[in-house]
Image (tube, helix red, strand yellow):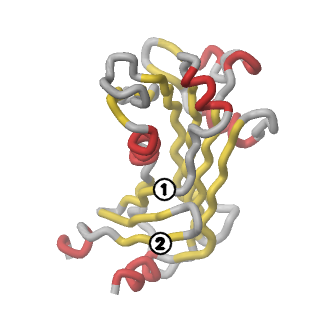
Amino acid sequence: MAFVSGLAVAVVTENLILEHRNNRLEFSAPRTDFFEGKPMTRLRNALEVPFLIQTTLWSGNRNHVFARAADRFVVSMDIFADSSDAFTVVKTALPAKRVSHLTAKQAQAWCLSQMSLDTTGLSGSEPLWAELRILAEDPAREGNILGSSVNQTGISLIPLIDFFSHQPGQHSSWVLDYDAFTLDQLKHTRD
């Protein structure tokens, strides 16, 4: 059984890939470039760009949230890198993490790798839905979205979840869904 749980199982939509490994649902979106457009313009102008990322897993129906994760990632151009297109990313929620000298694709993949969800307790036949939501924060327009929720111990994720629930239309945003799958179906795609 331990051998089977260590294998990666993937389900692919046009833009969203789900992998189930060691009771964790992992998200990736290799065809989605969330640095493109206005975020990349800001990055090339030596400005930091905060991205709010949320992953959600529903079970049974789309009204029952089984698991959700939300975090904030601050991306900037890596001025100490050999390449002019290298990025540094800081994950702001505890445990805070920092990586540097990454390409745009590597930086985006790293952000998503931090957003896996625990699937412990789900049956193999239970209907599931998954969503990946990415929002590029524009501090010049909105001010500090997190308000007073940032302190010395990190950030409170409640404002992030509230913000994603009432997403303003002025931000660069991406929503990728994967509808109606089961863990058993993920296992069968491997066979």
Q: Residue at coordinates 57% horizontally, 27% vertically from top-left?
A: 50
Distance, label 2 to label 1, CA atoms, is 13 Å
Question: Where on the picture, by quarter, is residue 187?
Answer: bottom left
The local secondary structure at tag 1 comes to loop
User: What is the residue that sits farthest to the right in this orientation?
Assistant: 169
Label 2 crowding class (10 Å Cα cut-off): few <14, some 14-19, many 20+?
A: some
| Residue 119 in picture, x, y percent from top left | 42, 62
Question: Where on the picture, by quarter, is residue 36?
Answer: top right
Whether residue 88 is visible, yes or no, is no
| Residue 180 in picture, x, y percent from top left | 61, 75
Q: Residue 30 carries which label?
A: 1
Q: Which mark is residue 85?
A: none
Of the pair 159 and 107, the residue shown nearer to us:
107
Disc with the residue nearer the chain's start (2 vs 1): 2
Q: 18 above or below 99?
A: below
Label 1 crowding class (10 Å Cα cut-off): few <14, some 14-19, many 20+?
A: some
Question: Where on the picture, by quarter, is residue 10?
Answer: bottom left
| Residue bearing the label numbered 2 | 11
Q: 137 above or below 111?
A: above
Whether residue 94 is visible, yes or no, is yes
Q: Residue at coordinates 54% horizontally, 27% vertically from top-left?
A: 156
The local secondary structure at tag 2 comes to strand
For the C terminus, give its image quadrant.
bottom left
Horizontally, residue 109 falls left or right of residue 71, namely left
Horizontally, residue 29 falls left or right of residue 133, namely left
| Residue 33 in picture, x, y percent from top left | 56, 46
| Residue 182 in picture, x, y percent from top left | 50, 77
Of the pair 137 and 32, the residue shown nearer to us:
32
Residue type at numbered disc 2: Val
